[in-house]
Image (cartoon, rainbow, N blue to C red):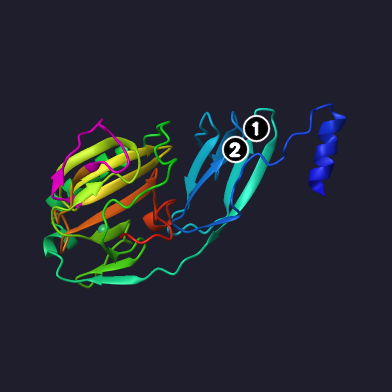
Amino acid sequence: MRWMQRASALLALGVAAMPLAAATLPASLSQGGLVTATVAAGSSATVNGKSVRVGTDGMLVFGAGRDEKGPIVVVITTPDGRRETSRLAVTPRAWPVERVNGVPAKTVNPPPDIAARIQREQAEVAAARKRDDDREGFAHGFIWPVTGRISGRFGSQRIFNGTPKSPHPGMDIAVPQGTPVKAPADGIVTFAKPDLYLTGGTVLIDHGFGLSSNFLHLSRLDVKVGQVVHQGEVIGAAGMTGRATGPHVHWGINWFEVRLDPLLLPGIAGTAPH
Ligand SMILES: [Zn+2]
């Protein structure tokens, strides 16, 4: 009955009754999941205390990382000063273990000079993910960049040649060498290099609001930094450059530095890559 008290308080102040829900937020999300929501235009928002972009149309985006325990606290402040706090529960997931053998030893335990190169390359990629672009390339959902068997899942604990490594930060789709890779959503290319040590041919696309896709192990790059791409446009070709044991496309999706599961994206969730 709290809403009635609030409604009558507003009426008592002579303010016209307005819908009290400032946002259309779900009650919960899964680890690795993405939320796109609409709040009253002109609102401001924080997610776990961090200020996030609200589009001119009220669009808001955030995600839960692989190990996020929740709750995720979202505070919306509407233009008329109302403040609404939502606590979203985060549903835990069981992460599989993936053993990958036959990985070139120099990519599993790189020598110090190579480790420095890897660090430098990862810093460049991390910088590209800091952008907070106002484009809404994600707004029409995502499509599969290639179709094929899913050969590696987001979040799995990976053991390379018997050595435990960090969790798999994206999804692998096994396809023949040279298969065209399509932009899963509109965006702008923010990184494109053919020869990173671990990830080989690497392309990042910024879809806006901190959401970015990365495509790794490409055999060919068809785009340049600064190029605007549209959903379905070919950005390169699949390969096995960098640390890979066979031709596949690694597709990762980030909300800033937080890695999300491509399989949970709108347009992808519940569909098969065929
Ligand atoms: Zn991968």
Question: Marks 2 and 1: CB-CB under 8 Å?
Answer: yes
Q: Residue 89 appears in which quarter of the rendering?
A: bottom right
Looking at the image, which is closer to me, 150 or 12? 150
Residue 114 in percent (x, y) is at 14, 51
Residue 118 seen in this snapshot: yes
Question: Magenta segment: does it hold 226?
Answer: yes
Q: Give the range drawn in magenta.
A: 217-234
Q: Residue 98 appears in which quarter of the rendering?
A: bottom left
Q: How crowded is mark 2: few (under 14 residues within 10 Å), some or many (20 or more)?
A: many
Decide whether the magenta segment is chiefly helix, strand or loop: loop
Residue at 13% across, 56% down? 177
Above or below, 65 against 157 in this view is: above
Q: What residue type is labelled 2?
A: Val
Q: Which mark is residue 39?
A: 2
Looking at the image, which is closer to me, 21 or 180? 180
Q: Which amino acid does label 1 sit on?
A: Thr
Looking at the image, which is closer to me, 138 or 85? 138
Residue at 79% across, 29% down? 16
Residue 11 in percent (x, y) is at 84, 32
The kind of secondary structure element at disc 1 is: loop
Question: Mark 2 or mark 1, which has the lower sequence index?
Answer: 2
